[in-house]
Amino acid sequence: NAGVTQTPKFQVLKTGQSMTLQCAQDMNHEYMSWYRQDPGMGLRLIHYSVGAGITDQGEVPNGYNVSRSTTEDFPLRLLSAAPSQTSVYFCATLTGSGYNEQFFGPGTRLTVL
Amino acid sequence: RKEVEQDPGPFNVPEGATVAFNCTYSNSASQSFFWYRQDCRKEPKLLMSVYSSGNEDGRFTAQLNRASQYISLLIRDSKLSDSATYLCVVNTGNQFYFGTGTSLTVIP
């Protein structure tokens, strides 16, 4: 089992460009989420999904869109990249309740120039 | 006010030392609590869940005080391999809130 995979590992964008960060899981977990990690800020939740067809906003959703058409995939779209979106992005999954372990992907390092 | 607050450290301790990390959370409705470990440039991984009665896993002991909204992690007999950043995590509803992390370096 691959667990949680993220692509790409690294990306450089110019201001105003759009792109999609991919997240896939093969654990059949219902809950998937996207975080960004910035120095001194910890991980902050961008969007999450409790199952296919259901998404909701986290702490810092502005500038990002998500969709969840399948259990396996949860892509994160940057509509018009800004330097403030330079960060490390982690996708995570969870099965069952919030009492359980989250499994994280290896992260995508994004730089917006 | 931040949902979760941690002392960022850094903590530099010799091998064999005992070190304690603390964390406070702001929402009394929070339901579950965790410590995650994150190595440099890697993803976070679960170290242990934190239960109201306190729990131990080998050299690691976690405590939760719901009245004070306070979580702690104690590491005994520190090893070089314990060097990492330790993240306090709180679950409220469908959302998880992370502290900024406490950096630990264990020195030979």
Image (spheres, grey):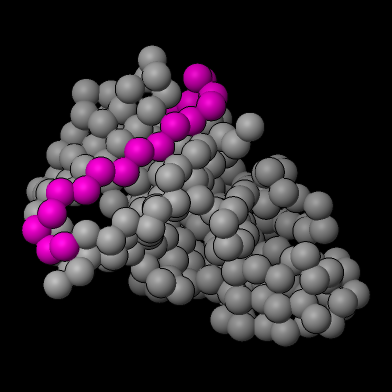
Residue A64 locus on image (x, y percent): 78, 58
Residue A88 locus on image (x, y percent): 60, 69
Instruction: Say if residue A12 shows up in the picture.
Output: yes
Q: Residue at x 21, y 29 (%)?
A: B54
Give the residues in magenta.
B14-31
Horizontal placement of B49 versus A104: left or right?
Answer: left
Query: Is B38 located above or below residue B88 in the figure?
Result: below
Q: Quadrant of the C terminus of chain A?
A: bottom right
Horizontal placement of B21 versus A112: left or right?
Answer: left
Query: Is B81 located above or below residue B26 in the figure?
Result: below
Q: Residue at x 72, y 84 (%)?
A: A12
Query: Is B3 located above or below residue A64 in the figure?
Result: above
Q: Residue at x 73, y 56 (%)?
A: A67
Horizontal placement of B17 versus B22: left or right?
Answer: left
Residue A15 locus on image (x, y percent): 87, 77
Q: Residue furthest top?
A: B67
Q: Is residue B15 magenta?
A: yes
Give the total number of marks visible in the rendering: 0
Q: Quadrant of the N terminus of chain A?
A: bottom left
Image-quadrant location for residue B38: bottom left
